[in-house]
């Protein structure tokens, strides 16, 4: 069933979520769209995708895994951090971002054992997506197998039509939530309107088949020397990528008293692969940039299927030297 | 001849005649009002070179990657100042360089532009004289360039390149930086300045784009990348961010040319000039030294006079 929420009702729908959930929506922040925690009076921005990723809600920039110390009698003491344990709800998520969360799920939940801190945040989260009626200037989701109306990773799909939103449950959790909310059914005309918008947004191009295999054979290709030339070797692209998930585990404090942290790391940093011996197998920016591209378009797809890039375009927007992943793919013979 | 046309011709000639092995300049970017660094090894690509207010990167940091090669490099005035420092510090060999100075009226500050567009997506943009013509879905707006120039440019008191082999646009396109007055020493109390500093540092993610974009940050191994001992945590919490930026500030003091490349590289819009303009000001006011000028002078951190002021040492 397709439900309908009039535009004026949205606020009430969000308010109901905000108690049991930690609710995040796209908000306007000095000319940028960012994900912000909803509170009464906040109007979600319905145009454009957020500058930052939803990844940071599930895999924060830095998180305390536990604190450690010693009891007065000298025995070790480990303390789990206090957290807001309400599940997350995200409204206005773009289909690319939801798809990216699905990829993080593969890495953090699809393994044995699953990753506890990630699972804690991810479990029970409600992902409410919004169809992109007008893809942005750096978007290329359709070229990497996604769609501006895609439902992968989502629980509920919202399509904005005149006067409100058509809402469809696209997962079991979404169905349960829709049943509970009991939204009035959309009229046939409203459903037709939503379908039209979804179809207009549907992919124009499809992913390049065989790119992963082809890249595997091009590890030593000369092209890498040229491709990385202007790259500065910062972590802007990886930190803002919704599928990049590399982390470092470190201790803060002293040997017998401190916290163990998990923090974002980046394959673009020289220290990322530095061995204790001092040897570094990825010596220069060339090897590091190759790793970034290969991980997304070769290693991950060979292992899990789709590319580890959802075409959100964030790396294109944040790169200080405008190194465009679409151009890189074009040079490598991929999509675009 | 317009500077851009002259640049294309010059770069083609330098490469064709083998006077340089590599020419580093700017080409059109993939997003509106962006340019991107280009590396030419053949004259054929020279026609794609561009100049103008979208050329926001400082290209000097790239030089370290091409030791021993003869490189042609496009420099705006601030980039040229950075080059003076690199030469002073024996980081680049002047003999291997062909420096092309270009006129500059300031580069666009994407942060100011974002604020001005207030959430509208820019899908087309071009510079027409003094106007930046912006456009998106069902809207168009022309914004005067001087309202969009980066704060470093607005304060640029030295908008003509100091160092060059050729300076394009010699006089015909006089450099028209808005030359805002020298800033007065920040009179706010320490608390207010600390709050401003904290507010900026809270945004930082420690992605190190600022460091990577900076011509003065060329250490083969940055102190933050040491793990034995670890001088700093990498968690990105406020104290880590403050520590990184304060140590970086000390390391670039008297060397920072206020080119603003670090601030423009920052994806989080951290106002790094909170520190940088102060560094430049202190070097000038206390030691009468302006980084990037006077190539014959010793480095500021490397020179000592018995009568150097020391009343800031408490
Ligand atoms: S953001 Fe750009 S400069 Fe920084 S590492 Fe990525 S590609 Fe390189
Ligand atoms: S690689 Fe770039 S375009 Fe692809 S998902 Fe990551 S940030 Fe988005
Ligand atoms: S610190 Fe920033 S302003 Fe100073 S030289 Fe480096 S990039 Fe330029
Ligand atoms: S570029 Fe910005 S976010 Fe990145 S380390 Fe520098 S100040 Fe922090």
Image (cartoon, rainbow, N blue to C red):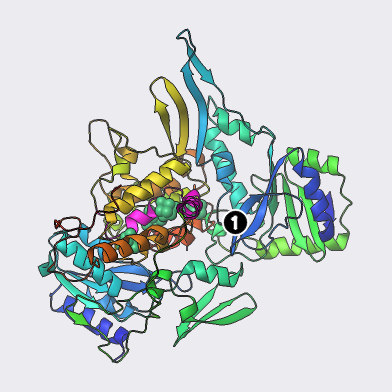
| Image x and y of residue A218, in percent | 32, 50
Quadrant containing ligand 3 reads bottom left
Q: Where does residue B72 sit, x and y in percent of width and height?
A: 20, 72
The residues colored magenta run B190-218
Compare residues A314 and A297 and report the one nearer the observer: A314
In this picture, is B65 found above or below A273?
below
Most prominent secondary structure in the magenta stretch?
A: helix
Mark 1, other Cα within 10 Å: few <14 / some 14–19 / many ≥20: many
Q: Is residue B43 magenta?
A: no
Residue at position x 41%, y 28% in the image: A253
What residue sits 48% from the left and 75% below the top?
Answer: B148
On whether residue B194 falls in the magenta region, the answer is yes
> In the figure, B195 relative to B79: above or below?
above
User: Would you say the beta carbon of the disc 1 residue lies within 8 angstroms of ligand 2?
Assistant: no
Q: Is residue B25 left or right of residue A260?
A: left
The chain that hosts pointer 1 is: A
- Point out residue A173 in the picture as x, y percentages from the top left corner: 74, 38
> With A171 as the anchor, is B28 left or right in this view?
left
Closer to us: A56 or A306: A56
Q: In this view of the protein, can residue A18 be seen by the observer?
A: yes
Q: Is residue A231 visible?
A: no
Q: Quadrant of residue A142?
A: bottom right
Q: Furthest-top residue in view?
A: A73
């Amino acid at each position: 069933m397709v439900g309908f929420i009039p535009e004026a009702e949205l606020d009430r729908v969000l308010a109901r979520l905000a108690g049991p959930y930690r609710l995040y929506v796209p908000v306007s922040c000095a000319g940028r769209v960012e994900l912000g925690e909803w509170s009464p009076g906040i109007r979600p921005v319905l145009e454009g995708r957020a500058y930052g990723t939803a990844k940071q809600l599930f895999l924060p920039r830095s998180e305390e895994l536990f604190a450690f110390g010693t009891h007065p009698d000298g025995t070790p003491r480990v303390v789990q951090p206090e957290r807001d344990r309400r599940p997350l709800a995200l409204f206005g998520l773009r289909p690319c971002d939801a798809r990216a969360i699905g990829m993080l799920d593969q890495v953090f939940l699809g393994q044995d054992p699953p990753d506890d801190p990630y699972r804690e945040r991810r479990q029970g989260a409600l992902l409410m997506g919004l169809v992109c009626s007008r893809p942005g200037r750096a978007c290329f989701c359709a070229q990497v197998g996604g769609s501006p109306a895609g439902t992968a990773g989502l629980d509920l799909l919202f399509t904005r039509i005149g006067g409100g939103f058509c809402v469809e449950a696209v997962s079991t959790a979404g169905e349960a939530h829709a049943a509970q909310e009991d939204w009035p059914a959309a009229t046939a005309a409203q459903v037709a309107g939503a379908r039209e918008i979804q179809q207009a947004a549907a992919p124009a191009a499809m992913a390049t088949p065989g790119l992963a295999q082809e890249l595997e054979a091009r590890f030593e290709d000369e092209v890498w020397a040229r491709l990385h030339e202007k790259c500065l070797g910062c972590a802007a692209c990886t930190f803002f990528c919704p599928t990049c998930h590399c982390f470092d585990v470190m201790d803060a404090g002293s040997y017998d008293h401190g916290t163990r942290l998990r923090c974002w790391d980046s394959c673009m940093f020289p220290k990322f692969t530095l061995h204790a011996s001092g040897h570094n197998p990825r010596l220069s920016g060339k090897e590091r940039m190759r790793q970034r591209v290969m991980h997304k378009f070769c290693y991950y797809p060979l292992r899990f299927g789709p590319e580890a890039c959802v075409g959100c375009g964030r790396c294109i927007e944040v790169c200080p030297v405008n190194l465009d992943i679409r151009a890189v793919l074009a040079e490598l013979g991929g999509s675009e | 001849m317009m500077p851009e046309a002259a640049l294309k011709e010059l770069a083609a000639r330098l490469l064709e005649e083998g006077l340089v092995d590599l020419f580093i300049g700017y080409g059109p970017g993939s997003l509106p009002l962006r340019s991107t660094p280009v590396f030419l090894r053949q004259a054929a690509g020279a026609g794609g070179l561009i100049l103008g207010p979208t050329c926001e990167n400082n290209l000097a940091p790239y030089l370290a990657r091409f030791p021993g090669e003869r490189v042609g490099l496009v420099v705006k005035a601030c980039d040229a100042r950075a080059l003076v420092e690199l030469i002073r510090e024996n980081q680049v060999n002047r003999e291997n360089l062909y420096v092309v100075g270009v006129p500059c009226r300031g580069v666009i500050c994407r942060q100011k532009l974002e604020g001005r567009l207030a959430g509208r997506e820019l899908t087309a943009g071009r510079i027409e004289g003094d106007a930046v013509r912006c456009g998106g879905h069902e809207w168009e707006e022309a914004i005067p360039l001087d309202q969009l120039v980066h704060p470093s440019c607005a304060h640029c008191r030295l908008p003509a390149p100091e160092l060059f082999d050729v300076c394009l646009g010699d006089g015909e396109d006089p450099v028209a930086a808005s030359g805002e007055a020298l800033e007065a020493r920040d009179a706010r109390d320490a608390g207010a300045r600390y709050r401003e500093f904290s507010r900026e540092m809270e945004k930082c993610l420690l992605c190190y784009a600022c460091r990577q974009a900076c011509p003065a940050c060329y250490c083969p191994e940055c102190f933050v990348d040491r793990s034995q001992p670890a001088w700093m945590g990498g968690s990105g919490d406020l104290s880590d961010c403050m520590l990184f930026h304060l140590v970086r500030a000390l390391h670039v003091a008297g060397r920072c040319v206020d080119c603003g490349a670090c601030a423009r590289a920052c994806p989080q819009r951290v106002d790094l000039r909170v520190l940088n303009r102060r560094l430049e000001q202190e070097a000038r006011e206390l030691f009468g030294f302006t980084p990037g000028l006077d190539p014959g002078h010793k480095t500021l951190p490397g020179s000592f006079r018995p009568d150097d002021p020391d009343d800031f040492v408490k």
